[in-house]
Amino acid sequence: MSVTLDEMFNYVKRLCEAIGPSGREHDVRGIVIDLVKDSADKVWVDTLGNVIALKRSRSGSSKLMLAAHMDEIGLFVTHIEDNGFLRVQPIGGIHERSLAFQRVLVKTRDGRVYRGVIGLRPPHVAKPEEARQVPEIRELFVDVGASSKDEVKGMGIDVGDIVVFDRDVIRLSTSRITGKAFDDRVGLAAMVKAFQIVESSDVDVYLVATVQEEVGLKGARTAAFAINPDIGLAIDVTLANDVPGTPPHEWCASLGKGPAIKIADGRSASGIIVHKEIVDKLIEIAKRLNIPYQLEVLPGGTTDASVIQLNREGVPTGVVSIPTRYLHSAVEVVDLNDIVNTVKLIKGFVESITTDWVKSLRGVEVK
Ligand SMILES: [Zn+2]
């Protein structure tokens, strides 16, 4: 079954325009359930809110966990000023540099959605050195068009409500698109599509749309404990720094050159060094199926794979990454060809691996 750019554009548009910062993934969860239910043998939502869909294998003797996160970065409302402005604090790694003067959506606890903008003292009244600096989060405020605290309260907005970027997903060219929450809803779109079109496999496939990745890989941790997989594969985005002013040795990945097969990320205890056999297998599959690919060694950041790998006695876990420019901003850019090729690589992996091979990775007796 072939996958088209238009089809993936529609999946990405539907998933990315939904509001779902960490811990408030409810709207995204509904879409994922809708997209996977017809191709799964069983679908459930666990305690933290992960969506888990199971597709049973021919033999059923080993378990593959696929993971991509549903949550996006955002803000919590922390305070309402007397004159109706909202003060905020970050949910996940949202950077002040990408926040000032953006349009946002504010969602209340009872589900009402309002438009707002993030304001800051304009350069005309700022001191010259202040105008050059990145504003701190405490200097920013959200303007929802209200003139008093009572008016804001009357709208149903309160402390703890959520704020995300207000962006449609649009095409910049035939294959390049821009929007918010590409991290990781483009990975989610690719995982869901691959799950739908997998024809048969020798391993049980557990698709996990995870929660709270941006605040510490939390959903993946509890889901891995519950599923107890024999092997894992996370699908997330990676840095494409192939832009002016960045030398090629700092690009990490380039747009349009295919999914990146991760070798390692992070430089500390929180990162992952991917099991060598998994890297080799992904490369072998990409070559056999003529899927373009890149190799990724990322200087910082990590993915759900890091906690899956450390579940119980250890789980060999790989990562397939979709190159993305301007990560964690409201104008992330990806190439639809990379998403289509990621779908093909995930499908190829699921259909190629055997229970015997998976068992061969689970440790050997040497005496
Ligand atoms: Zn991510």
Image (cartoon, rainbow, N blue to C red):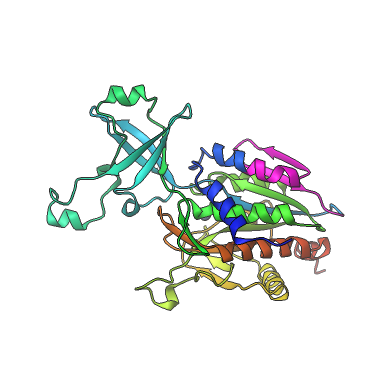
* Residue at 71% in and 74% down: 284
* Image location of residue 179, percent across then percent down: 45, 53
Q: Is residue 363 left or right of residue 83?
A: right
* Image location of residue 107, percent across then percent down: 43, 34
Question: Magenta stretch containing residue 43, yes or no?
Answer: yes
Q: Is residue 340 above or below residue 307?
A: below
Q: Is residue 160 above or below residue 65?
A: above
The segment highlighted magenta reads 32-58
Q: Quadrant of the C terminus?
A: bottom right
Q: Residue furthest right?
A: 59
* Residue at 59% in and 58% down: 6
Q: Quadrant of residue 115?
A: top left
In this rendered view, identify the residue nearer to me: 113 or 121. Answer: 113
Q: Is residue 155 above or below residue 141?
A: above
Q: Residue furthest bottom?
A: 248
In this rendered view, identify the residue nearer to me: 37 or 92. Answer: 37
Question: Magenta stretch containing residue 80, yes or no?
Answer: no
* Residue at 44% in and 77% down: 249
Q: Quadrant of the N terminus?
A: bottom right
* Image location of residue 285, percent across then percent down: 71, 71
